[in-house]
Amino acid sequence: MSSARRSLLTATAAGTLLGALWFVPSANATGDAPARTTPSATPTPQVTTQARAMTSSTTMEGTQLADTGSFDTTPYVVGGTAFLTLGAGFVVFSVRRERLGF
């Protein structure tokens, strides 16, 4: 492998890593309000309202977290398969091109 190609692969790997790290959330957990010194033993009204809404099966409408079968996933499966096939085709093409010496 030539030194120019090795540098290109290193730069590509570094750019990919930096691009992936861009989406990692920051760990800044500071707020504008001061922290409470004593924990509260009773839940807030918002928490109890949410708990009541989640336990009642008649009030749940729409797509919920991990609710399978509620919407059509066919376009996502077809698109993912197409991109996977395209990527595999590029890999096969590049390996074949390298072996033939183009």
Image (spheres, grey):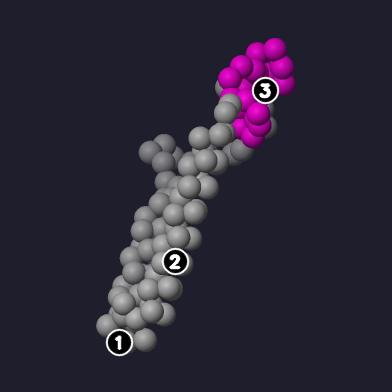
Classed neighbour count for the residue bearing mark 2: other residues with Cα under 10 Å, few (<14), some (14–19), many (≥20): few
Is residue 75 in the magenta section? Answer: no
> Disc 3 residue type?
Met
Disc 3: which residue:
54
Is 31 displayed left or right of 67 in the figure?
Answer: left
**Span highlighted in magenta in the image:** 47-70
Q: Residue at x 44, y 54 (%)?
A: 86
Residue 39, quarter of the rendered image: top right
Q: Residue furthest front?
A: 100
Is 22 displayed left or right of 81 in the figure?
Answer: left
Q: Quarter of the image for the N terminus: give it.
A: bottom left
Disc 2: which residue:
91
Q: Is residue 86 above or below residue 33?
A: below
Asked whether the beta carbons under mark 3 and mark 2 sit within 8 Å of each other, the answer is no
Q: Residue at x 41, y 62 (%)?
A: 90
Q: Viewer-proximal residue, 59 or 84?
A: 84
| Residue 71 point in image, percent of width and height | 58, 26
Does label 3 or label 2 sit earlier along the sequence? 3
